Image: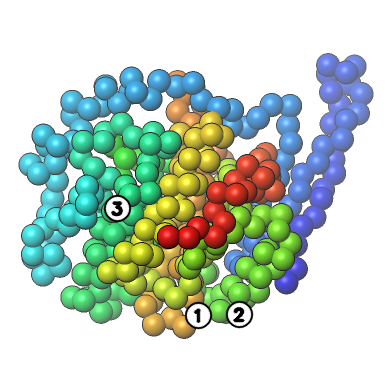
Amino acid sequence: MELRREVLRGQVLLPDRGFSAAETVVEMRWDPLTGHGARLVRGPFPLFPPSGFDLAGLAEQTRPTCPFCPERIELVTPKLPARVWPDGRIRCGRAWLFPNLFGYAQYTSVSVYAPELHYLPLERITPELVADNLAAQAAFCAAVGRQDPAARWAAVNANHMLPSGSSVFHPHLQGFVQPVPSTFQRLLADVPAERFADYLSTERRLGARWLGTTGRVAWLASFAPLGPAELRAFVTGAAAPAALDGDRDLVDELGHGVATALGLYAELGFNSFNLTLYGAPPDTAGYPLNLRMLCRSSLEPLYRSDVTHLELLHWEAAVDLTPEEVAERARGRFGDRRS
């Protein structure tokens, strides 16, 4: 498999050097599965410097009106229809799941890691918290599928902190199930099974971005990232999130990997991220569940958004932390965990 890249060189006249010429370099890369582009850039300062924002202070400001905290969650959050879940809300360990008030899809969900954990920075998100939350979402997807077989496209998502698109400070996941795919679900589902296998074997052989396997889940840094510090995971033997329902060993394995990645993000100085677990119809042969997660701009009183015209309208991320640098920082954390 070809991992396509091209280096483009330009020139700028710098005022602090008497307007003498200096070279500019941008490396273009194209994702080997979907073909989308990415740009690796270098500049005079980091695009996303570490944050010094007082997250704990913002947590205290938002706690008194938070709908997901213990004193309000049962009173103000909605319930699932009885045909989907008789109790109205799904409980898995410390996680609570209920419908999303915003109808982003035909069936939507929100699941909090724990009502009492209003302040949950990345370094405190444990494998158990992630696994319980993923288990709740898997149960939701399976329940919807049982009562509406036409709703065959499901995804589990995270908007962590305000820069990621979250409107509620309290950390949570979101899910959706519907009869049609999202754009990226469609692109990934159209990839032949052998191409996924070729991609993973190529990256494993090259080693520059390969992070290891934890059993049924393979982890690597994205060759053509959608955003800062993107990591990808591929879950073999499962095409839809509902396939995780009842398979606690696999849920725990995936939760361990996500929590490991979030610990890395915290070390890199980030406090906000997005995540999506892209499902395909359950009977899609050879499709591995695809997980993508990436950092977002950190909270600051004045900060640069990481979504510009390039990301939103051209579908090409511009990042200055290369996948190889991310892999170097992540290496040794994902390899061959044994239970």
The label on residue 194 is 2
Q: Can residue 294 be seen?
A: yes
The number of discs equals 3
In what quadrant of the picture does the C terminus appear?
bottom left
What amino acid does circle 1 point to?
Gly
Give the residue furthest to the front: 339
- Mark 3 to mark 1 CA distance (whole Å): 26 Å
Q: Residues within 10 Å of mark 2 (few under 14, many from 20)?
A: few
Q: Which of the two labelled residues, at mark 2 and mark 1, occupies the earlier sequence position? A: 2
Q: Residue at x 74, y 27 (%)?
A: 44
Q: Residue at x 82, y 37 (%)?
A: 24
What amino acid does circle 2 point to?
Glu
In what quadrant of the picture does the N terminus appear?
bottom right
- Mark 2 to mark 3 CA distance (whole Å): 31 Å
Q: Residue at x 67, y 45 (%)?
A: 328
Give the SS element for disc 1.
Answer: loop
Question: Are circles 2 and 1 on residues that touch, CB within 8 Å?
Answer: yes
Q: Which residue is mark 1?
A: 286
